[in-house]
Amino acid sequence: MATTNDLKNGMVLKLDGGELWAVVEFQHVKPGKGGAFVRTKLKNVLSGKVVDKTFNAGVKVEVANVDKREMQYSYRDGDDFVFMDTETYDMVNVPAKTVGDAANYMLENTLATVAFNEGSALYVDLPAAAELTIASTEPGLQGDRSTGGTKPATLETGAEIKVPLFITTGERVKVDTRSGEYLGRA
């Protein structure tokens, strides 16, 4: 247990019947009249929904213990993704629902941060950019290279992204793992 006076960015709170919320921002406010309060912006750890919530100063809140571990993606086992803890070499199955869109940018041996709470995986966080190979794309038209147009391309993971017309099948490219945007050649 902690009080609202102890809040810090990144802290994870257990509110509203056990839901986990990460503190994105907080601000202590002491108006001239009335009691002090804490204005916060909270992000739901599982759904990603962001809400504004105001607490009275000094109110007790339950802090959730979130353990973030560096893990290596090993292989897919049915609907689960199997990760190996890089320190203890333990294998952990993480459901596809928890991995979410990160699966589009993960190859075997990809390092990721996996967050756990009470033994269950909450989310998988990849590095900001991944280097992947273009599995297939249509050839660009000659003379179209300076127009700045894009075309669809399929990555080796099966995800589809938009790339510039000059990119060809077999090239390695950098992809933003949060938005799925092409960042450049690798």
Image: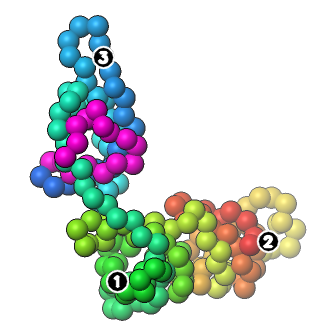
Measured as percent of width and height from the top left, residue 174 is found at 67, 69
Front position in the image: 15 or 133: 15
Q: Determine if the magenta segment contains residue 137.
A: no
What residue lies at 80% left-to-right and 58% top-to-bottom? 147
Boundaries of the magenta span: 1-16
Compared to residue 136, the image places residue 2 above or below, namely above
Q: Residue furthest right?
A: 143
What residue lies at 65% left-to-right and 74% top-to-bottom? 131
Front position in the image: 30 or 39: 30
Mark 3 vs 2: CB contact within 8 A: no
Q: Earlier in the sequence, mark 1 or mark 3?
A: 3
Mark sitting on residue 166? 2
Mark sitting on residue 92? 1
Q: Residues within 10 Å of mark 2 (few under 14, many from 20)?
A: some
Q: Nearer the viewer, mark 1 or mark 2?
A: 1
- Tag 2 secondary structure: loop
Q: Which residue is mark 3?
A: 30
Mark count: 3
Task: Give the CA distance from mark 1 to mark 2.
Answer: 41 Å
